[in-house]
Image (spheres, helix red, strand yellow):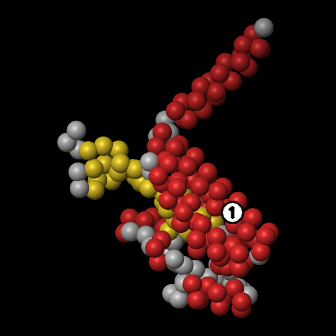
Amino acid sequence: MKIQSILIIPLFFIIGTNQLAAETVDTNILEARELVQKFFGSLKNELQSALQEGGPITAISICKLKAPRITKEFSSLSGWYVARTSLKLRNPFNAGDDWENKVLAQFESRKAGGEELNEMEYSEEIMIKDKKIFRYMKAIEVMDLCLNCHGENVKPGISRILKQLYPNDQAIGFKIGDLRGAFTLAKSLSNVDQ
């Protein structure tokens, strides 16, 4: 009987500590993580379907036409600003602001220091004029799926189409495991004078 209670007490302590750690995570971070997971899942499903239907050329049309619509849809339905950005842009409309570019540079440094990209995120509350804004970024790691259009050896036909659609394309030359960019989210928390 004593042995059972000795074993059960540490178990309750471990469970209680884990619950406390989970409860201390900002609800904004949890909400942002969930939104990124759904957004990424939606984009990935569209790209995989396009690749299966018509290959990389069909996937390019998804990125050009459908991804911006999906992004707007997630923003309007969630109440968050939802987007993607990178230090090596393909679409100039995805250019980051100073805060986002600073975080992307930080992600590159953290990756160089050995941190795994799939766990990499950053959040911060900032003031813009009289509003408190919660900002969140989650790193995007280059996967095999990305190499068709973003890799080091993009096929000439695909490369030609990309140059037509994106004359200033910088988003090539990636390898699996590189930092492709990041999901970037923001939402207004409150007005200062409230």
Residue 17 rendering spot, x and y as whole percentages: 58, 29
Q: In this orientation, which residue lies closer to the viewer: 80 or 152?
A: 80
Circle 1 residue = 46
Location of residue 143 with respect to 23 vertically, above or below:
below
Dot 1 falls on a residue whose secondary structure is helix
- Residue 102 visible in the snapshot: no
**Quarter assignment of residue 148:** bottom right
Q: In this orientation, which residue lies closer to the viewer: 161 or 123?
A: 161
Please name the residue shown 53% across and 60% down the image.
Answer: 71
Q: Is residue 106 left or right of residue 151?
A: left
Location of residue 119 with respect to 163 vertically, above or below:
above
Please name the residue shown 26% across and 44% down the image.
Answer: 191
- Residue 189 visible in the snapshot: yes
Q: In this orientation, which residue lies closer to the viewer: 182 or 56?
A: 56
Residue 117 rendering spot, x and y as whole percentages: 61, 62
Location of residue 153 with respect to 124 vertically, above or below:
below
**Quarter assignment of residue 103:** bottom left
